[in-house]
Amino acid sequence: MDRATGGKRMSDMTSHDDAAARGTPFATKTLMPLMNTPFAPGTHLQAIESMAPGAQRDIAQAEYFYFSGQPEQALATAAPYLSSQDIAARLSACLICAYANLPLGQAHEAKALLDQMNAILTKAGEHSPQLGAASAFVSAAAAVLLHLPLPQELPDTDALLPLLPRGLRTFALYVQAHLLYLKGEYAISAGIVEATLLMGATDYPIPTIYLRLVAVMDYMSLKDVEKAREHLLAAWELARPDDLIEAFGEHHGLLGGMLESVIKPEWPDDFRRIIDITYRFSAGWRRVHNPVTGDEVADDLTTTEFATAMLAARGWTNQEIADHLDVSINTVKRHLAHAMDKLGVTSRKELQRYMLR
């Protein structure tokens, strides 16, 4: 039995691709249904229980487990759908299980599931434009969040977005904004976030949390700390009632020390839980990302050392870092010295090689 794939061999999980892509009606209701559902903060359980029993409710429950930092439960709940004839449910299970495997130290299984998503993508458009859009959505989300190259078969975003339901379209815009961030187009990325939020994205808690976190990334890159703080607090206010803390742990290294500056002083217990997610998730993330891209993202720094080094590599002075993190300059110097010593570098410029973009 393979715990990472619900007892199914990877060959079994791909054996029905051709038949399923040709013959199974596309069911939007089972494509990341919790992400695609508007619900008031604190009412995720009611939202899940209102769904039809079976694939839709099970996938939604797996989503909740994942987004609340419970990867073991997410994997156990979603894995039975990895060979489902309902392609939307299978795509959802692939995405959930791929990411749940990362903090569980199962990078090989995560990579195999990414490959399965891309295999479905190559055939999906032949079945229907909607299925092609669904498959492209899942594949793009998986690639961009891992900072991997986009699949060659991915359709143009302008053609993809109108075919997605509103909640998934909102998350797809997060993916697009994240991609622009990786290209260094911070102002354009932030503009997409702000426009999406103005158009009603806040009805959908999960996509909105991710949107606001990429805005934090953008504004920290633009050194607009107050705007970054506003978005972080808005995301946190939305996440807390349902304990949707996974995204904060995933994005820690990109948030420019904002978790240390804003969350740690007021919510120290939650901060510790987030950092635990960060350590587990980032270890698996690097095991997939580094071999594929050839990057050398640092794997032996503490989260505080990494945040300090990221800011230093981006040109922040010791005083600016100290003010931002509310620590002394000597503390900043100590963190930087430890980081440089561990990485074997002697200058801030050299730090860039080991940092996230």
Image: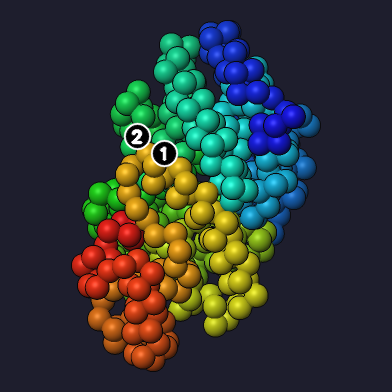
Look at 71% across and 36% down and name the residue there: 3
Question: How many numbered badges does the structure rendering display?
Answer: 2
Look at 47% across and 21% down and name the residue there: 119
Relative image position of residue 59 (x, y in whole percent): 68, 36
**Pointer 1 with pointer 2, Cβ within 8 A:** yes
Other residues around mark 1 within 10 Å, as few (<14) / some (14–19) / many (≥20): some
Q: Determine whether 286 is above or below 308 in the image.
A: above
Relative image position of residue 76 (x, y in whole percent): 73, 39
> Seen in the image, is 176 located left or right of residue 348?
right
Res. 86 visible in picture? no
Q: Quadrant of the N terminus?
A: top right
Question: What residue type is disc 1 on?
Answer: Ala
Question: What residue type is disc 2 on?
Answer: Leu
Quadrant position of residue 275: bottom right
| Callout 2 secondary element | loop
Residue at the disc numbered 1: 143
